[in-house]
Amino acid sequence: MELQKDSKRDSMGLIPPYGGQLKDLIIRDESQKLELISKASHEIVCSERNACDVELLMIGAFSPLEGFMDEENYKSVIQNHRDASGFLFGLPIVFDSNNDKIKVGEKILLTYKKQKIAILEVSSKWEPDKSSEAKFCYGTNSLDHPAVKMIFNERGRFYIGGKIYGIELPIRDFPCKTPREVRASLPSNFDVVAFQCRNPIHRAHYELFTNALLSNNVSSNSVVLVHPTCGPTQQDDIPGKVRYLTYRELEKEISNER
């Protein structure tokens, strides 16, 4: 297995965030939060998928984005896998709605499970060509593909782009560290072997990422970062909370501190 390395490091001895800066879109000032909420013209209850995307924007996981993609950036991504500035995005980061009354320039209060989580300042609204999006992003228009089915059957008629002002992170069934918290836990000036998995870890997975530490181009003091993805799942997938609990069990059983 060949591991790719990046020799550029920031002042903490870590590879810089994508785009050069880790975005933090959460408003801390309570009076500013109240002012933003008071200016909202509409309120939208987020789907689970939208709430996940709002959270990822708020904590900088989609850096360098500061909000949902507008029409120009959306079209650029579904044609070139890059936004209008040239940043690589495999999929467009979009917010959907069926509300035909929302206008550019308005502010929308986004809620999730009765929480006020963010304000979306509308800079763009359009009806997407979902067929082109599905074909380019997933290589098919067949509803047998779960992501294509999601685009056509779950997402609303309109896509809305605009800046996000974070109010409160959604409350989750399990703790989710922010990118800033994860970066603070990593060793300075040593390699990090990152392993992303959407399933409970199998023995083959474990062997793969522990043996990666022995690779010739990995420093002797490197560590493995196990990064589970937990969000909306397919019907036959293991739920995120159950996956999280399997990782906790693995953590108890493994004595290897790396």
Image (cartoon, rainbow, N blue to C red):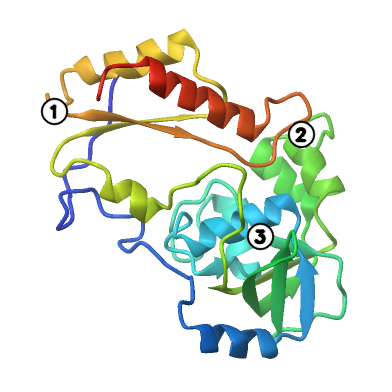
Query: Which quarter of the picture shows residue 231?
Result: top right
Q: Indicate the position of residue 104 as horizontal and vertical percent values.
A: 71, 84
Residue 13 image label: none
Of the image marks 2 and 3, the number of the one nearer the N terminus: 3
Q: Residue 97 appears at what percent x and percent y?
A: 80, 65
What SS does tag 1 mark?
loop
In the rendered image, residue 234, in percent from the top left (x then y), is placed at: 74, 32
Q: Is residue 1 above or below residue 116?
A: above
Instruction: Say which quarter of the image contains residue 212.
Output: top left
**From the viewer's perspective, is residue 142 above or below residue 93?**
above
The three-letter amino acid code for the residue at tag 1 is Asn
Q: Nearer the viewer, mark 1 or mark 2?
A: 1
Left or right position of 109 against 165: right
Q: Residue at x 58, y 38 (%)?
A: 230
Distance, label 1 to label 2, CA atoms, is: 41 Å
Q: At 66% from the left edge and 57% from the top edge, which residue is drawn? A: 51
Front disc: 1 or 3 = 1
Query: Residue shown at 68%/90% (left/top)?
Result: 38
Which residue position holds label 3? Answer: 94
**Residue position marked by numbered label 1 in the rendering:** 221
Q: Please give left or right for residue 92 compared with residue 45 in the image.
A: left
Q: CA distance from mark 1 to mark 3?
A: 40 Å
Of the numbered discs 1 and 2, the one sitting upstream in the chain is 2
Name the kind of residue labelled 3 in the image: Val
Mark sitting on residue 146: 2
> Which of the image's four quarters has the N terminus?
top left
Give the spatial CA distance, label 2 vs label 3. Answer: 18 Å
* Circle 2 SS class: helix
Q: Nearer the viewer, residue 20 or 171?
A: 171
Amino acid found under the numbered disc labelled 2: Pro
**Few, some or many residues within 10 Å of mark 1 (<14, 14–19, 20+):** few
